[in-house]
């Protein structure tokens, strides 16, 4: 008798502490919480070795957008954050103020179009890079697929567009879409069963039974797709466009700039280059929203 053995690797995330840094989305110095991502071998989910670090991720406590935590040896972490960002910067990352001054200089040059074309488009592309995983997770078929997308992005640097998860997965079906799909699956066989008493012994089912079943399935699948598409559009408008508009507002990109950047991401196979419309991004820039607290 064969006995299955469960073994492999499992992921682990541990908080290292808080650090002050410049947030590209908030366009100011913010407190970041840093997590260390590691994998450990296991047998029957019992660790059999020491964890191996894969990456470190820093998440802004204001907008909840994450990025790779590529900090130098002079950066320190503190266990608690009391809300005083100036004190946190002095304790953890004294160079944060210099980074903000440098970023403000680049933003002014990008807005005034004094930066070289490639550098200006790269500056405009930064918030798209950080928000790309949110859109990828939104279009993933389920939560497990969304987590696979994130694990891939964390494990490898997809230069120049390497991204880390930015928030909770939204890959599951919307509630209305789920109701439509379940209703069509239940009602279609019910219509077929209703045709059995109407058919004589050895006679085929009446035309209205299988026609009705097929019509219900088609209607349910169509309604599911429409509700899911609406759910995605509303999620983009609520969680992606406000942050994107907030980050891009100081850069004052033109429609041509946005099309060029979004084409880059679309060519790379990332949904953020296809799911968003230039008109919606421009509208979000004109009316930037407050950071999304999730």
Image: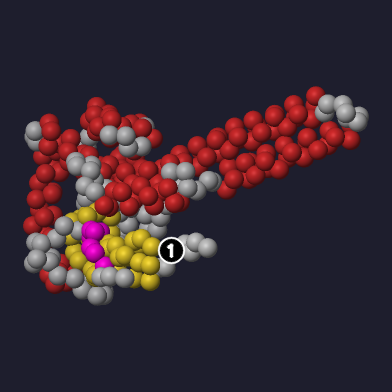
Q: Residue 66 at x, y = what percent?
A: 28, 55
Q: Residue 116 at x, y = what percent?
A: 9, 33
Q: Residue 200 at x, y = what percent?
A: 91, 29
- Between 238 and 70, the residue placed more toward the observer is 70
Q: Is residue 289 above or below residue 13?
A: above
Q: Residue at x 10, y 39 (%)?
A: 109
Q: Quadrant of residue 209?
A: top right
Q: Is residue 86 visible?
A: no
Specify the segment rendered in magenta.
51-57
**Which secondary structure dominates the residues rendered in magenta?**
strand
How busy is the neighbourhood of tag 1: few (under 14 within 10 Å), some, or many (20 plus)?
few
Q: Residue 236 at x, y = what percent?
A: 41, 43
Residue at the outermost right position: 200
Q: Is residue 102 above or below residue 177?
A: below
Q: Is residue 181 above or below residue 206?
A: below
Q: Is residue 34 magenta?
A: no
User: Which colour scheme appears in the figure?
Assistant: secondary structure
Residue at the outermost top position: 207
Q: Quadrant of the C terminus?
A: bottom left
Residue tagged 1: 5
Label 1: state its secondary structure. Answer: loop
């Amino acid at each position: 008798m064969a006995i299955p053995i469960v073994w492999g690797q499992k992921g682990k995330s541990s908080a290292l502490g808080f650090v002050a840094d410049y947030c590209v989305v908030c366009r100011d110095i913010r407190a970041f919480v840093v997590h260390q991502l590691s994998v450990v071998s296991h047998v029957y989910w019992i660790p059999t070795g020491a964890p191996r670090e894969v990456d470190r991720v820093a998440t802004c406590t204001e907008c909840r957008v994450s990025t790779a935590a590529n900090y130098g040896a002079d950066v320190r972490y503190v266990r608690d954050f009391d809300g005083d960002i100036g004190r946190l910067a002095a304790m953890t990352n004294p160079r944060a103020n210099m980074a903000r001054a440098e970023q403000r200089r680049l933003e002014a040059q990008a807005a005034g179009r004094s930066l070289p074309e490639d550098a200006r488009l790269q500056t405009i592309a930064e918030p798209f890079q950080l928000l790309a995983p949110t859109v990828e997770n939104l279009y993933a078929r389920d939560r497990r697929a969304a987590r696979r997308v994130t694990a891939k992005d964390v494990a490898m640097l997809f230069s120049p567009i390497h991204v880390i998860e930015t928030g909770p997965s939204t890959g599951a079906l919307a509630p209305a879409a789920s109701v439509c799909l379940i209703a069509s699956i239940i009602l279609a066989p019910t219509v077929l069963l209703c045709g059995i008493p109407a058919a004589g012994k050895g006679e085929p089912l009446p035309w209205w039974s299988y026609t009705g079943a097929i019509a219900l399935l088609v209607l349910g699948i169509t309604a599911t797709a429409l509700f899911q598409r609406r759910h995605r559009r509303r999620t983009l408008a609520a969680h992606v466009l406000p942050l994107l508009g907030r980050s891009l507002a100081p850069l004052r990109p033109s429609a041509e700039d946005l099309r060029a950047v979004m084409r880059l991401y679309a060519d790379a196979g990332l949904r953020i280059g296809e799911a968003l419309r230039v008109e919606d991004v421009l509208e979000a820039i004109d009316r930037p929203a407050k950071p999304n607290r999730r």
